[in-house]
Image (tube, helix red, strand yellow):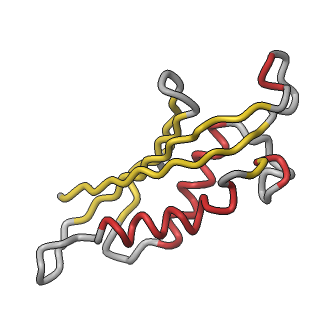
Amino acid sequence: MYEVSVIKEISASHQLNNYKGPCARLHGHNWKIRVDVVTEKVDVTGISIDFEDLEKLLWQVVGKFDHNHFNVVAPFDSINPTAENISRYIFEEMAQRLPESIQLKKVFLWENDRYVVSYSS
């Protein structure tokens, strides 16, 4: 089994609803997103999925949030933009975009160097 990962970073703000603490106030992060995919197949050149292609698919999912406020961009205009909810959203959106031979294994989402959430099915 081959496992391929890409990492993308975005800068975005958010504020947590129904939360008692400083994160209820508007604040921002330099979010780091890692996507792990797996496959048993490679093409004639020996590549399972091109890193650049995987990164472009990830950008299709997260690009709209870069330098934006999560709380005003769908679906987070109606869903609390917690790290857990954001990582699940990225996972579900990426799963729809991958070629049939590639399975999404896990999404990691860092708010900073110390706080990370992962989501898998």
Residue 75, above or below 19: below
Q: How many marks?
A: 0
Question: Taking 99 as reference, is 66 left or right?
Answer: right
Which residue appears farthest toward the bottom when viewing the image?
44
- The quadrant holding residue 52 is bottom left
Q: At 19% from the left edge and 59% from the top edge, which residue is drawn?
A: 2
Q: At 85% from the left edge and 26% from the top edge, which residue is drawn?
A: 25
Image location of residue 12, percent across then percent down = 69, 45
Q: At 29% from the left edge and 59% from the top edge, which residue is drawn?
A: 38
Q: At 87% from the left edge and 28% from the top edge, which residue is drawn?
A: 18
- The quadrant holding residue 61 is bottom right
Front one among 106 and 46: 46
Residue 52, above or below 5: below
Front one among 25 and 93: 25
Image location of residue 45, percent across then percent down = 12, 80
Question: Taking 2 as reference, is 118 left or right?
Answer: right
Residue 30, above or below 104: above
Question: Taking 49 as reference, is 35 left or right?
Answer: right
Image location of residue 65, percent across then percent down = 69, 55
Image location of residue 63, percent across then percent down = 61, 62
Question: Taking 18 as reference, is 5 left or right?
Answer: left
Which of the image's four quarters has the N terminus? bottom left
